[in-house]
Amino acid sequence: MNLLHSLVPSLGRNGGQVRPEASPAQADLGPTVRPVYTLKETDDAYGATVYLPGVTKDGLDIDTENGVLTVVGRRSWKQPESWTSLYRESSDATYVLSLRLDLSIDVDKIHAELNDGVLRLSLPKSEALKPRKIAVS
């Protein structure tokens, strides 16, 4: 077990994936697939990289509710009517990823950036939990 999973077990792959009841907004998503993602930790924040090929900023929804971070990515490509598809490597399924957030994360300062289908999330730790140097008088 690595340091990240021992300190914050709720962010781990096995413990972090939650399957909440489908909200009304997610009920009409149709078939969904969980995207590939990685988690990293620094002294100031946790970082999540989520791979969402084919998703643009218009098709991306990120929200937090009741300690759960939910990422929903919809692909925007539509096949032209004049095309006949012989083979397609990817499906039209919507990406849905739900991660349970630890209490040490400052939800108001979460930052997200999407470039070429790669979503980078910065989940900053609250100031009270950051290491500090204490001066001796």
Image (tube, rainbow, N blue to C red):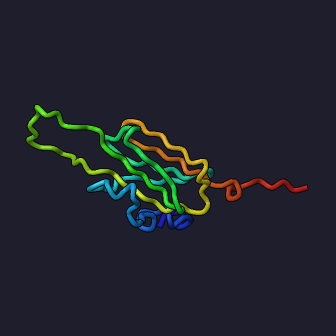
**Where residue 33 sits in the image (x, y, percent)?**
30, 55
User: Which one is in front, 77 or 8?
Assistant: 77
Q: How many marks?
A: 0
Q: Measuring 15% from the left and 44% from the top, which residue is drawn there?
A: 88
Q: Measuring 62% from the left and 52% from the top, which residue is drawn there?
A: 43
Please indicate whether residue 101 sits to the left or right of residue 37 in the image.
Answer: right
Q: Measuring 21% from the left and 46% from the top, which residue is drawn there?
A: 90
Query: Image quarter for residue 106?
Result: bottom right
**Where residue 93 sits in the image (x, y, percent)?**
26, 51
Please indicate whether residue 14 sits to the left or right of residue 94 in the image.
Answer: right
What residue occupies the far front of the structure in this picture?
Answer: 24
Query: Image quarter for residue 116?
Result: top left
**Where residue 47 sits in the image (x, y, percent)?**
51, 50
Q: Measuring 46% from the left and 49% from the top, which residue is drawn there?
A: 62
Please indicate whether residue 132 sits to the left or right of residue 54 in the image.
Answer: right
Q: Is residue 90 visible?
A: yes
Above-or-below relation of 49 to 19? above
**Where residue 3 sits in the image (x, y, percent)?**
53, 63
Above-or-below relation of 122 to 77? below
Q: Where, quadrant-wise, is the C terminus in this rendering? A: bottom right
What residue occupies the far right of the structure in this picture?
Answer: 137
Q: Is residue 42 visible?
A: no
